[in-house]
Image (spheres, helix red, strand yellow):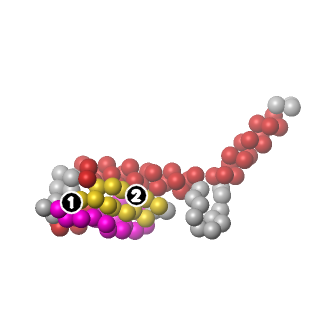
Amino acid sequence: MSMFRPISAFLMAVMLIGCQAYVDGSKRTLGEVADDSQISLSVKARLVDDPEVKGLRINVDVRRGVVTLKGRVPSAYAKEKALNIARQTGSVVSVEDRLTIVE
């Protein structure tokens, strides 16, 4: 019984961290971090898989569902396609364009 109390207190603390509310708007819960990571992986995989976009030169940053694409693309068509790929990925709130066309 004495071993049960510290373990349950630890588990309760871990669960509360996952349920943390925004205090000043700068902190994210563990769930939000996981969601952003999943979005980032999905967008990056789709960009790399597209032969016109050549996604290896594009950095994907996600914060609270907002995807920021930074990097170089070979044409205006590739740029628009990269932005559309990001927009069409599940759970994306919006997409910020910081792509540069390099021919």
Residue 2 rendering spot, x and y as whole percentages: 86, 32
**Label 2 Cα crowd, 10 Å radius (few <14 / some 14-19 / many 20+):** many
Q: How many marks?
A: 2
Furthest-right residue in view? 2
SS class, disc 1? strand
**Label 1 Cα crowd, 10 Å radius (few <14 / some 14-19 / many 20+):** many
Furthest-left residue in view? 103
Tell me the kind of residue under disc 1.
Val
Q: In terms of depth relative to the viewer, which is nearer, 59 or 11? A: 59
Residue 23 quadrant: bottom right
Q: Which residue is mark 1?
A: 73
Residue 66 rendering spot, x and y as whole percentages: 43, 65
Q: Quadrant of the C terminus?
A: bottom left
Q: Is residue 81 visible?
A: no
Cα–Cα span, label 2 and label 1: 16 Å
Which range of residues does the magenta coloring cover? 83-102
Residue 79 rendering spot, x and y as whole percentages: 22, 64
- Disc marking residue 61: 2
Tell me what residue is drawn at x 33 percent, y 52 percent: 44
Tell me what residue is drawn at x 59 percent, y 61 percent: 27
* Residue 87 lies in the magenta-colored region: yes
Tell me the kind of residue under disc 2.
Asp
In-image side of 32 versus 56 (left or right): right
SS class, disc 2? strand
Decide: is 13 above or below 92.
Answer: above
Tell me what residue is drawn at x 36 percent, y 51 percent: 42
Tell me what residue is drawn at x 77 percent, y 40 percent: 8
Q: In terms of depth relative to the viewer, which is nearer, 24 or 35? A: 24
Lower position in the chain sequence, tag 2 or tag 1? 2
Residue 78 quadrant: bottom left
Residue 59 rendering spot, x and y as whole percentages: 33, 55
